[in-house]
Amino acid sequence: MKKWNFKIKGNPKELSKKLESEFDSVNGLVFNMDHRKNNSTTFKMRKRILYPWYLFFLNSLVVNGKLSKIQTENEADIEISFNQHFLWILVIATNIIVGLSFLFILVSEKNKNIWTYLIGVLILSIGIILWITIQKKYERNIQEYKTLISGILKN
């Protein structure tokens, strides 16, 4: 999870309306906003994943944000956190656990088959390669969201 905090000139209610009008019209994006708190507004957005293979092609971040009013007049504090989608975490953890399980079976000498060793190494390497690739994609997607949100709020 990465956090991004900044201050911007403007009323939080006006900024939240600007975000809501911009993101509500985007098809395939889930955008929820909560105005119930006194001086703050929270929002959450992510791209909708309709099919499992969308996970590989779409931006799979969950963005949580909070707009709050600062004591200074006409200024807002914005806190945004970026999280990976739960399905990616599940896929990577499953690959690594299954690969390590195969290697543990081999080390415990219950099965000395070379195929067990190859399957374990293959699944473990797939998990590690996925992890590294997803971390790079995660950083790229964070930068995309940062430029998108800052562009909307500064206009």
Image: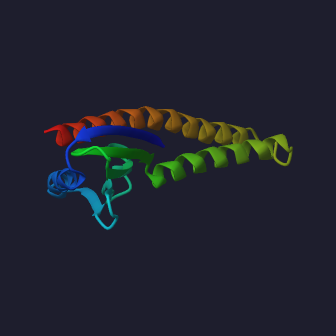
- The type of colouring in the image is rainbow
In the image, residue 148 above or below residue 68: above
**Along the line of sight, which residue is nearer the eye, 29 or 111?**
29
**Along the line of sight, which residue is nearer the eye, 93 or 117?**
93
**Along the line of sight, which residue is nearer the eye, 104 or 132?**
132
Quadrant in which residue 7 is drawn: top left
Residue at screen point 51% across, 33% down: 132
Residue at screen point 85% across, 44% down: 108
Quadrant placement of the C terminus: top left
In the image, residue 34 above or below residue 145: below
| Residue 124 rendering spot, x and y as whole percentages | 62, 39
Q: Is residue 110 left or right of residue 59?
A: right
Q: Residue furthest front?
A: 72
Q: Is residue 123 left or right of residue 61?
A: right
Residue at screen point 28% across, 43% down: 72
Quadrant in which residue 128 is drawn: top right
| Residue 130 rendering spot, x and y as whole percentages | 50, 38
In the image, residue 37 above or below residue 12: below
Quadrant in which residue 151 is drawn: top left
| Residue 148 rendering spot, x and y as whole percentages | 23, 39
Q: Is residue 51 left or right of residue 9?
A: right
Q: Is residue 103 visible?
A: yes
**Along the line of sight, which residue is nearer the eye, 15 or 2?**
15
Q: Is residue 150 left or right of residue 110?
A: left
